[in-house]
Every structure is written in structure tokens, then in C-alpha cells.
Image (cartoon, rainbow, N blue to C red):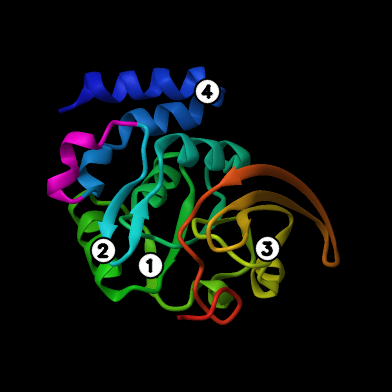
């Protein structure tokens, strides 16, 4: 279902510079229309962010592709996702062979995502809690991806990142952020690249924004 629309979307994000075939293959296989509210299904394969309720969004497909390409998860690696949302990004990572751990702070979105994971038989570990402090129990992680904008880089997440691991996180104010691509060289040494002009919902939590 929607295979033609999905193929057209893949061609569109390829033209925007996404070259990682594993990312493109995963996005071709994961059916985005299953992760959006029913009222939004007709827009599922447009390259736009869509509302999923509770002030949250499912990210623009190009943004998902860009972040995943920068993250570059390898099969079998442990990946921690902060901000499950509808579960689409987690499903992409799972399709790429990662062992996915995902955190969502909104209990209704969390429960909706669990139902989708169960329906699609996706073996993804999920919890409902403050993502800004990570998930210490299963650390360290080879990759960490944060799908909400943070005022800074949460120290707990840096500590939970494995040496030689990589984290992708939007950092900035509440309206616009730069994507930080962080590689952990040693326990106290990091290499950081930056890609500007992204817009995510705020990362709310102890090491993120405070609730208004």
C-alpha cells in the first residue's frame, strides 16, 4: 500500500542529498502512513512534519533521513532514541538492524507507539520517562539520537554514550536549533560537527527545557 508514494518520497530525499542506501532502503520498507493519525494519512508521504497530537509531531522525512544518515547505525548496535513520538524513527532504526531503546515522556504517545510496535512485531524496548536523563540500565549505547530540541547537551546522555559512539542532537532555543553530531573520542573528549537550521519540539526534562 502506498508503495508508489513512498518511492516518490525516496527520490525526493535523494535529490536533497541523502546517499546512504541503508537509510533509503529502511525508509522504503517502513510504512509512514501507519505512524500518523488517520486524519493525516493522505499527507503521510509528503516531505513535511505532521502533528501527532499533544503538541508533538512526526518529523519531516528528510530530517529523519538526514539524522539517521549522520547517526549511521550499524546492525547489532545499541541505539538509544530520546523522543519516541509515533514510533516512526525507532522503526527506521530497527529496520536497519539496530537494537533500539526508546524513551517517550508523554504517556498517551508512549502507549500509542507500543500498540504500533506490537502490531508490526517490532521488538523495540520502550519506556515512559524523562528522556533527557537517558536510560542508565542498558548503557553504554553505540548511538544516541535525540528527536527534540535541547537548550544544551545533556551530560547524562554524554556519559551513557560508548567511547567511539555517536550522538545526534538538536541544540538551540525553543524555535530553531543546530544539529550537533558528536563523536565520543574518550571519556572526556568529544569531536563535534554541526548542521544548522532545524526546528524540533522542545526536549522537556531535568536536563532539557522546563515545562511552562
- Say whether residue 38 is magenta: yes
92 displayed left or right of 209: left
Mark 3 and mark 2 lie on one chain; the one further toward the N terminus is 2
Relative to 24, does residue 140 appear above or below in the rendering?
A: below
Q: In whole angstroms, how far apart are the C-alphas of marks 4 and 3?
A: 29 Å
> Few, some or many C-alpha atoms within 10 Å of disc 1 (few <14, some 14-19, many ≥20)?
many
Q: Circle 1 sits on which residue?
A: 126
| 185 or 38, nearer to the observer | 38
Q: Which mark is residue 16?
A: 4
Q: Within 10 Å of the Cα at label 4, are there few (<14), some (14-19), or many (20+) other Cα atoms?
A: few
> Circle 3 — which element?
strand
What whole-number distance in Å separates the C-alpha atoms at marks 3 and 2?
A: 25 Å
Does the rendering let one see residue 46?
yes
State how far apart marks 1 and 2 are (Cα): 8 Å
- Quick check: is 178 in the magenta stretch? no
Residue at position x 35%, y 60% in the image = 56
Of mark 4 and mark 1, the one earlier in the sequence is: 4
The vertical placement of 148 against 183, above or below, is: below
Image quadrant holding the N terminus, namely top left
Residue 109: name its quadrant: bottom left
Look at the image and tell me whether residue 134 can be seen.
Answer: no
Q: Label 2 near label 1: C-beta < 8 Å?
A: yes
Which residue: 49% across, 56% down? 147
Magenta residues: mostly which secondary structure? helix
Residue at horizontal 55 percent and vertical 60 percent from the top:
149
Residues rendered magenta in the picture: 37-46
Q: Secondary structure under badge 2?
A: helix
Give the answer, above or below, for where 84 lies relative to 62.
below
Q: Position of residue 35 (x, y in %)?
A: 25, 48
First in sequence: mark 4 vs mark 2 = 4
Residue corresponding to mark 3: 161
Amino acid at each position: 500500500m502506498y508503495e508508489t508514494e513512498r518511492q516518490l518520497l525516496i527520490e525526493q530525499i535523494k535529490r536533497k542529498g541523502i546517499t546512504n542506501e541503508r537509510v533509503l532502503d529502511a525508509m522504503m520498507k517502513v510504512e509512514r502512513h501507519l505512524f500518523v493519525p488517520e486524519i493525516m494519512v493522505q499527507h503521510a508521504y509528503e516531505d513535511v512534519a505532521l502533528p501527532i497530537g499533544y503538541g508533538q509531531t512526526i518529523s519531516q522525512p528528510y530530517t529523519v533521513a538526514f539524522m539517521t544518515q549522520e547517526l549511521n547505525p550499524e546492525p547489532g548496535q545499541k541505539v538509544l532514541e530520546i523522543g519516541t513520538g509515533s514510533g516512526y524513527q525507532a522503526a527506521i532504526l530497527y529496520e536497519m538492524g539496530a537494537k533500539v531503546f526508546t524513551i517517550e515522556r508523554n504517556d498517551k504517545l508512549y502507549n500509542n507507539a507500543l500498540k504500533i510496535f506490537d502490531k508490526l512485531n517490532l521488538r523495540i524496548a520502550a519506556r515512559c520517562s524523562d528522556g533527557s536523563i537517558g536510560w542508565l540500565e542498558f548503557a553504554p549505547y553505540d548511538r544516541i539520537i535525540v528527536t527534540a530540541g535541547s537548550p544544551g547537551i545533556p551530560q547524562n546522555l554524554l556519559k551513557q554514550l560508548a567511547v567511539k559512539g555517536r550522538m545526534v542532537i538538536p541544540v538551540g532555543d525553543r524555535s530553531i536549533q543546530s544539529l550537533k553530531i558528536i563523536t565520543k573520542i574518550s571519556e572526556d573528549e568529544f569531536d563535534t560537527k554541526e548542521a544548522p537550521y532545524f526546528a524540533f519540539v522542545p526536549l522537556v526534562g531535568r536536563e532539557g527545557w522546563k515545562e511552562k
